[in-house]
Image: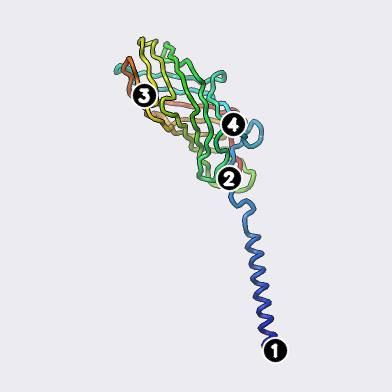
Amino acid sequence: MKLLRIKSALVRAAAGALALTGVVALGAAPAHADPLWTLYNEGTGAPLTSSETIEATGSVMIAMTWAGVPRTVTCSFTAAHPLALSGAGTLAGAPGDTVALGLMPPSSLACNSGALVLPFSFTGPWAVGVTMPAAGSSPGQLYDGALNATVTVPANALSIDFHAMVAGCGATGPTVGRVFTGTYDAHAGLATAKTNQIFTMTASGCAVTSWRVASASFSISPILDLQW
């Protein structure tokens, strides 16, 4: 009988230990098992919603070779003719994920090559991708550092009228969809493209070759941060 009582006590102790282990395991589970970075609108002081629009103003310089001579064209996107970012894509992502936003260009813009005015026309939407940084340290933390970013321009989303240079001359492209890379500084709200990114256009009525984005930078308003 004494031996049976000892065995019974051991069984009860083992059962208690297993129950305690289960409680500890459950208690150790993270409160936020799948944390995400969420796009955060500094203007509203809250996460970005799908109904909000963020404006990007700045300029793009396009370099090309015109009849063997290097030329540049500068397009300025002002508050009257901005690029419009929208929360039409994904508004949150895990570390390393790419968060996608819609980007709508103005339908037309007067760009400049020296004293010449060259009409540009655009079709959209385009797409912006922002790569999420490493995990945050605490819920609610804001991130306003540098982020890798891309802009995807679909094929033939850009047309240029060169009639100011040669009657009947124009170009359409990019010939194939092109992903342009750059960075976004969430502290300053400044997006900057990597310089000298090559793309192709189809010209008619003239010889225009060797296309590239020489430079591009845009201010984002309101500024977008990330919130953990």
Q: In the displayed structure, does residue 107 sit left or right of residue 161?
A: right
Q: Which mark is residue 2?
A: 1
Of 17 and 68, nearer the camera is 17
Q: Residue at x 51, y 30 (%)?
A: 191
> For numbered disc 2, what is the local secondary structure?
loop
Hey, what amino acid is under mark 1? Lys
Hey, what amino acid is under mark 3? Met
> For numbered disc 1, what is the local secondary structure?
helix
Q: Identify the mark nearer the N-term, 2 or 4.
A: 2
* Quadrant occupied by the C terminus: top right
Picture coordinates of residue 38 (x, y %)?
59, 40
Residue lying at the far left in this picture: please name it.
68
Of 123 and 116, nearer the camera is 123
Mark 4, other Cα within 10 Å: few <14 / some 14–19 / many ≥20: many
Q: Which label lies toward us, 3 or 2?
A: 3
Label 2 and label 1: CA atoms lie apart by: 58 Å
> Decide: marks 2, 4 in contact (CB < 8 A)?
no
Mark 1, other Cα within 10 Å: few <14 / some 14–19 / many ≥20: few
Hey, what amino acid is under mark 2? Leu
* Quadrant occupied by the N terminus: bottom right
Give the residue at mark 2.
36
Label 3 and label 1: CA atoms lie apart by: 94 Å
Picture coordinates of residue 147 (x, y %)?
51, 38
Hey, what amino acid is under mark 4? Ile
Picture coordinates of residue 171 (x, y %)?
38, 19
Q: Which label lies toward us, 2 or 4?
A: 2
Q: Which label lies toward us, 4 or 1?
A: 1
Q: Residue at x 52, y 36 (%)?
A: 100
